Image (tube, grey):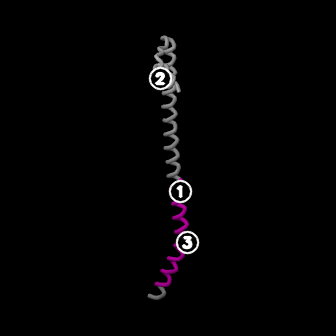
Amino acid sequence: MWSEVISELSQDGVRPITPDREALEAISRTVDERASHVLEVQKELLDAQLQQDLIDEQEYYAEVMKTFYVQAVPVLENIIYVFNEIG
């Protein structure tokens, strides 16, 4: 918004007096710094969310594998028993 104000003043040929120009520059710098900080925080939050998603996926996969082994081991034991009885 402040860059628009500065741009419009310039387009209209209005040149702010030194204190006003300094104030506009300070406000513009502050807004830019704040926007940069917000972008950095958003990136950190996105990275944290991606890390959490990866952890959740790994935990889910471990649970699926555990369930598979709990169900598969008795079946495999029965197959081995049958082969031992046959052979």
Disc 1 marks which amino acid?
Answer: Glu
Residue positioned 52% across, 34% down in the render? 38
Toward the viewer: 76 or 7?
A: 7
Other-residue count near label 2 (Cα within 10 Å), few / some / many at <14 / 14–19 / ≥20: few
Label 3: which residue?
71
How many marks overall? Answer: 3
Residue positioned 51% across, 44% down in the render? 48
- Start-end of magenta stretch: 56-83
Label 1: which residue?
59
Q: Secondary structure at mark 1?
A: helix
Residue positioned 49% across, 80% down in the render? 79
User: Of the residues tagged 3 and 2, which is closer to the observer?
Assistant: 2
> Vertical placement of 49 versus 60: above or below?
above
Query: What secondary structure characterizes most of the magenta part?
Result: helix
Toward the viewer: 26 or 17?
A: 17
* Mark 2 to mark 1 CA distance (whole Å): 53 Å
Other-residue count near label 1 (Cα within 10 Å), few / some / many at <14 / 14–19 / ≥20: few
Residue 64 belongs to the span the image colors magenta: yes
* Mark 3 to mark 2 CA distance (whole Å): 70 Å
Residue positioned 48% across, 19% down in the render? 12
Q: Are marks 3 and 2 in contact (CB under 8 Å)?
A: no
Label 2: which residue?
7
Q: Secondary structure at mark 2?
A: helix
Q: Are marks 1 and 3 in contact (CB under 8 Å)?
A: no
Whichever of callouts 2 and 1 sits on the residue coming sooner in the sequence is 2
